[in-house]
Amino acid sequence: MRYGRVTMFERVLIANRGEIAVRLIRACQELGVRAIAVYSDVDRDALHARLADEAYWIGPAPARESYLNIEAILRVAREHGAQAIHPGYGFLSENADFADACAEVDVAFIGPPAEAIRTMGSKTAAKRAVAQRGVPTAPGYAGGSNDLRVFEREAERIGFPLMIKAAAGGGGKGMRAVTDPATFADALSAAQREALAAFGDDAVFLEKLIVRPRHVEFQILADRYGHTIHLGERECSIQRRHQKVIEETPSIALTPELRAAMGEAAVSAAQAVGYVNAGTCEFLLESSGAYYFLEMNTRLQVEHPVTESVTGVDLVRHQLAIAAGERLALRQEDVTPRGHAIEARLYAEDPAHGYLPSTGRVLVFEPPQGPGVRVDAGVAAGDEVTMHYDPLLAKLIVSGESRAAAIQRLQGALASFAVLGVATNIPLLRAIAADADFQAGATDTSYLERHEFHLAAPAWTPSGVLAAVALWEALAGAPAQSTGPYNPWMRGESASTGAERRLRYQVGERDVTVSARAAQLEGYLLWIDGAPYPAEGVAVRAFLAGTTGLTLDVAGERSRYFLARRGYEVLIFEAGTVYTLAKPQPLDVETAAGRHGEMGGSAQALVAPMAGTLMKVNAREGDDFVERQTLVVLGAMKMEHAVVAPYAGRVTRVLHVAGDVVQGGETLIEIEPESGS
């Protein structure tokens, strides 16, 4: 196909996974380019594999055997006619050997030349190269010696505090901050060991520690004909463990003059190594306005969408065109940013438990929608999050005419971003968006170290959430043709007899019972632990939305919820907060009947140990029974489960008939012990 003045690729292999693979696949398809995906064993049904025009297996789950397996990826490219490979970010995106290997089999590498990757991949070589072009670099030592005495002498010259950094990599690995000369030798040894383990190279260098700097980077585009431009800056100062969390553009710290100077420095740095395609030059910026080259990322950045949002430039389209031989038609004066954009990275990790990675099935994934809201996601509901790869689930990108407008949009979008099944860092993102320092732009790379956000799980569950859960469970699993006298969804005479449906949950250390019955006209009357909700005689209306959504109407005020079951738990999302309610768990067939609680007066309840269909109900109101007598038979998971009497007694109410579908924790029969039991 034609694109501009050159022939665009017809088939491109995406050598990646997750949200960036999805982003690249869609860009190719928009251009009429056939997108070829690759996947590992655990990604066979992943979103990127489902969306691609073609998808092929490349190996087992470990990345080194699949997404880092150059031979396997090139084999797929050759066998299926890929003319180019886009590496995305991470994995092989900054691997010069991979770029060389692509060239050897005549497959275009959508990225810079291998030599540029090698030079910028070494922080010491990169600093030397850009310094020759007049780009400011932080004072330091990168002489290449491994002698402790040399390092100690250079450290004294630079002065403390200083940083020890791995020469061959980043991401915080092989990095140590040293403030006390007495700890320097131990820190140096630890950094070298970590660098060797992470990058196979123990080379490190020293650099002046810039105290509380901003992290500001510039987006570069360059064609193979020597034309290089920048597309403005991104501020990426909010980081946790040297990993970016929030990115935005423009940076409020830059004046027009400083922006022009740093942009020119970024262009000079790229030209110093003959750079081609998209890349990013990163700088540390002091409050005085002094800035220092940090490194160059020779790939597309995770945060590239914020640049696209304010410039209107599709970076991936330009990457494809440049790799195909197209001249870059954009001139520097053509780049005219408008408004403000912010990106928040959504990770599968649990802020309430030390940011531990969270794995499992995504039960609900409902991204926000609206003007100025973009979500680049790598998962959908039903997908599995495994331990094998980066925990990034999605990126939320918002834009507005001003920074204040973008922050307001960010807050609203985060409050409506529903994810259930795995824990996420949404509580942290919401706390940042609401923080006064963030809103004032008072951020630097130590921002999260200086802000202690208390992100524990909710300590209590609002009554509205309990009401929503009970109605969702009852409505979603309500039997269509139940004729039982206590079916609460039967109006008229049946309802007037006092029919109620009762469900039990564990909220913290206590059990809570929610009772529901159909109102005479519309809606449902609810009681929480016997107290009417919201008030005596006031009906609540509920509307299901698919299988996981519910809207609750309480006296005209509506609230939206998303809900899902996970084993014996119900997960609920409401206005940015996730609640977890436990339900009764049977230990075995006999003790299932023993999980009863008080239901008012001396009555006791036998509850359904799990969701299922009632096969038999062997009891009527007023019947006497003996200990261990089977009162109900529940069919679930292709098996029959007997619910037996825990003691001798009498049946006071039978709430269901055979054929009814019930939820786990739902009251089946109310009983009372015989006198003296």
Image: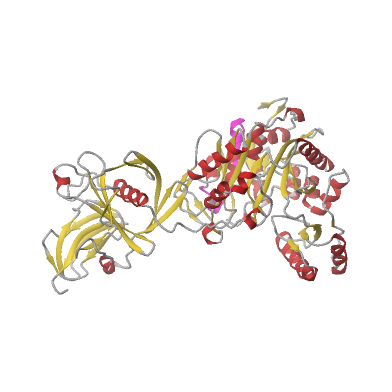
Name the spot of residue 518 as percent of width and height, x first: 23, 45
Q: Residue at x 17, y 47 (%)?
A: 483
Q: In front here: 361 or 400? A: 400
Q: Residue at x 31, y 68 (%)?
A: 588
Name the spot of residue 504 as percent of width and height, x first: 30, 58
Q: Is residue 601 left or right of residue 81?
A: left
Q: In front here: 10 or 93? A: 93
Q: Is residue 178 left or right of residue 556?
A: right
Magenta range is 24-45
Position of residue 305 relative to residue 429, above or below, is above
Position of residue 595 relative to residue 89, above or below, is below
Count of numbered badges drawn on the protein = 0
Name the spot of residue 622 as percent of width and height, x first: 11, 61
- Residue 546 is one of the magenta-drawn residues: no
Name the spot of residue 496 as percent of width and height, x first: 15, 46
Position of residue 393 relative to residue 194, above or below, is above
Q: Report which quarter residue 259 is drawn in.
A: top right
Q: Residue at x 71, y 48 (%)?
A: 215
Q: In front here: 289 or 45? A: 289
Q: Is residue 398 visible?
A: no
- Residue 36 is one of the magenta-drawn residues: yes
Its colouring scheme is: secondary structure
Q: Is residue 629 left or right of residue 363?
A: left
Quarter of the image with the C terminus is bottom left
